[in-house]
Image (cartoon, rainbow, N blue to C red):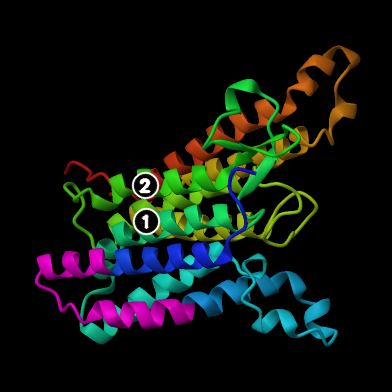
Amino acid sequence: MLLTDSPVFAVGLMIAGLAAGMVFYFFRLKKEGLPGITVLWTALLGVLLGLIASKAGYLVHDLGSNLFDGYFDEMLSLDPTTLSFVCGCAGMTAGAALAAKIGGIRTGKALDLFAAPGCVMICLARVAEGWMDYIGLGNPVEAGWLKFFPLSRTNAWGDAYLNVFVLEALTALVCLVPALRRQTADRRDGAVFERTAVCLLGAQICWEMLLQYPYIRAFVTSFVSLEQVWCAVLLLWIMIRGCIRGKRWWPLPAAAALLGISAFFQFFRDNKISFVFEEGWEKILEHSGTIAIAAFVLVSAGLVFCGLKAVSPAKEKNS
């Protein structure tokens, strides 16, 4: 394949991403006149809590099985295939929030400033997946318009596979836009972070669907990965908080419906619902992969839209 398995380079790239993010965070704090020592606490606590959360997030799939059958090796393993990326990001965020408390900074303010550096770290960490063997590798690509580097990679037999990690890295770069955008209508602390988080989570639900079987992160069912579940849980949690604050409720049922639609197209892509269609639908089923990719992108766009509406400021009523 065009990219090879090189764990040392991948780890180095992830460390570089952490360093770049912390330097970026330092300058953002200093620009606001906030103590720069918070960066050191963020790095220490963020890495520690990130590792703990990423391992705990993965081990959930073992509850009731291997974890309690005497197989404890996975609990101490740092193999990337036994770590939850989404939960790791949540742990890193918790570390940044705790560091803000130690530094005497408002948590929401600190997270707003941390959002952009967090996107930088995520971007480089996703790129690092390209040198971790099959992590971040998608399903075989049939459509000719998808067979080009870096969107896909080709093996020695001419088979092309989607580079999902590239899409994930580009998503993090795009999310720098809401992360760097200053608030105008809503000056509430934490609003920038929430806006960035719903964009990342909504998009990641789509990208997780494109990963090659078996999913790097464990299954909850035969077609939904554990990472998708964590993304949905965190997204809905942020949306519920926003809906309560803004007293608007339509984004929640809309998001739930979109998640259901995504499950349908997951079945559709895997041809698990072919029995529903009549014989005249064979041509459509032959292109189920391409149709499913388009559907996943539209679903994620809808989830991001619902999430942004949920966390947007409430409109003031005219007296």
Q: Is residue 300 above or below residue 245?
A: above
Q: Secondary structure at mark 2?
A: helix
Look at the image and give the residue range highlighted in magenta. 23-49
Crowding at dot 1, Cα within 10 Å, few <14 / some 14-19 / many 20+, comes out as many
Q: Is residue 188 visible?
A: yes
Mostly what secondary structure, the magenta segment? helix
Give the label on residue 127, or none: none
Image position of 132 with respect to 317: above or below: below
Question: In which quadrant is the N terminus drawn?
Answer: top right
**Residue occupied by mark 2:** 173
* In the displayed structure image, the side of residue 291 where residue 25 appears, left or right: left
- Of the residues shown, which amino acid type is indicated by label 1? Cys
Q: Earlier in the sequence, mark 2 or mark 1?
A: 1
Q: Position of residue 254 (x, y in %)?
A: 54, 40
Q: How many numbered circles are shown?
A: 2
The x and y percentages for residue 93 are 40, 70
State which quarter of the image contains the C terminus: top left
Which residue is denoted by mark 1 in the rendering? 119
Would residue 211 be counted in the magenta stretch?
no
Q: Residue at x 45, y 48 (%)?
A: 169
User: In the shown orientation, is residue 114 left or right of residue 285?
Assistant: left
Residue 74: horizontal and vertical position, in percent? 71, 79
Is residue 25 magenta-colored?
A: yes
Which secondary structure, mark 1? helix
For image coordinates 65% across by 84% down, the residue present is 76
Q: Are marks 2 and 1 in contact (CB under 8 Å)?
A: yes
- Gap in Å between the C-alphas at discs 2 and 1? 7 Å
- Res 199 seen here: no
Q: Residues within 10 Å of mark 2 (few under 14, many from 20)?
A: some
Residue 3 screen position, x and y as percent:
58, 48
